[in-house]
Image (tube, grey):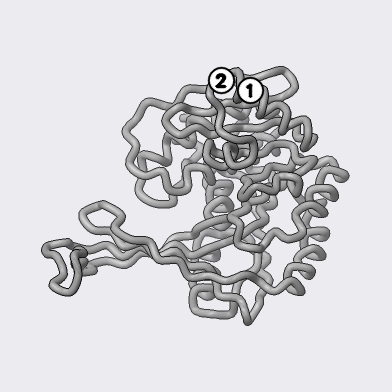
Amino acid sequence: MVIPSPQDLAQRRVLVVGDVMLDRYWHGAVDRISPEAPVPVVRVTREEERLGGAANVALNVKTLGARVTLLTVVGTDEPAARLKALLEQQGIDARLGEDERLRTIVKLRVIGRSQQLLRIDFENEPDHEVLGQMLEAFARELPLHDAVLFSDYGKGGLTHITRMIESARAAGKPVLVDPKGTDYERYAGASVITPNRGELAQVVGAWSSEAQLAERAQALRAELRVDALLLTRSEDGMTLFDERGATHQPAQTREVFDVTGAGDTVIATMAVLLAAGLDAREAMPHANRAGGIVVGKFGTASASYAELFG
């Protein structure tokens, strides 16, 4: 199995583009049921903030030892200020477009007895003029990076993704996409797309056998002119479909604590390794192992070089 050195990864740069969010966790004790409604009362004892969405993807790239630039749009509100502080704290180079009409995305999770009881989302869509400005920033950053990763959470921040993919491929850069929604035509020409089972079924329909899955996945890959489709399958591991056929990696056998952000880790690992010169088939086993590492951690998490290759 091909393993790049830490020195090699330190020379590689990945450009991460997509929807960022602030993940907030309120941890507390649950001792009683509310007299007002049949719901638990959580007495909050600890608050925590983490990078979410594309910002977590960027953190995963950096944790593995590569260099990363994050390109995204935020509001001018308090969550945006907290995101900036967290990005600086982690040493992540960020190009943040600002839209005063945008509400920076916040996902608030209420945790009681180590169980997620409730998630509350705060969001709206960015202004299209701001997104147009991001095209200029993308054009400036593209030549400085070895791979481009698009983290699409369906929040409106990747309106111009088709043009960005075209320019990145024209520049000879590997392009990876974590997709959302049913319009996969906008990802045409990418090097690798990484849908999960539910996301792929939305596009190609439910399958009843591995043969039917392979037929539909390969047809979609050909239609989109994508080099590889990496299907993440949770407890069933992952399967890569490319021009050579299909190859499967079983899930790493370990206790699953929290699947939040596991997809971020998988695609970040793929991007780092493609930036280092590996192909998708060579990178896939490492990405599978990285996903197995983070599901054993709480919340949005990342895997280090030592954890993955040590």
Task: Give the labeled residue for mark 1.
Answer: 214
Mark 1 neighbour class, 10 Å CA radius: few under 14, some 14 to 19, many 20 or more: some
Q: Residue at x 14, y 65 (%)?
A: 33
Q: Which mark is residue 52?
A: none
Task: Give the labeled residue for mark 2.
Answer: 210
Could you tell me the amino acid type at mark 2? Glu
Could you tell me the amino acid type at mark 1? Ala
Mark 1 element type: helix
Quarter occupied by residue 156? bottom right
Above/below status of 31 relative to 199: below
Query: Looking at the rendering, in which quadrant would you find the N terminus?
Result: top right
Quarter occupied by residue 271? top right
Q: Residue at x 47, y 67 (%)?
A: 106
Mark 2 neighbour class, 10 Å CA radius: few under 14, some 14 to 19, many 20 or more: few
Q: Residue at x 42, y 30 (%)?
A: 235
Residue nearer the viewer, 258 or 205: 205
Residue 304 spot, x, y in % from top left: 48, 41
Residue nearer the viewer, 147 or 34: 34
- Observer able to see residue 7: no
Left or right: 45 in relation to 184: left
Q: Residue at x 11, y 64 (%)?
A: 32
Above/below status of 93 relative to 257: below
Proximity of marks 2 and 1: CB atoms separated by less than 8 Å: yes
Left or right: 302 in relation to 178: left
Mark 2 element type: helix
- Observer able to see residue 239: yes
Q: CA distance from mark 2 to mark 1?
A: 6 Å
Residue 300 spot, x, y in % from top left: 43, 51
Left or right: 211 in relation to 189: left
Residue 98 spot, x, y in % from top left: 66, 75
Residue 39 spot, x, y in % from top left: 21, 64
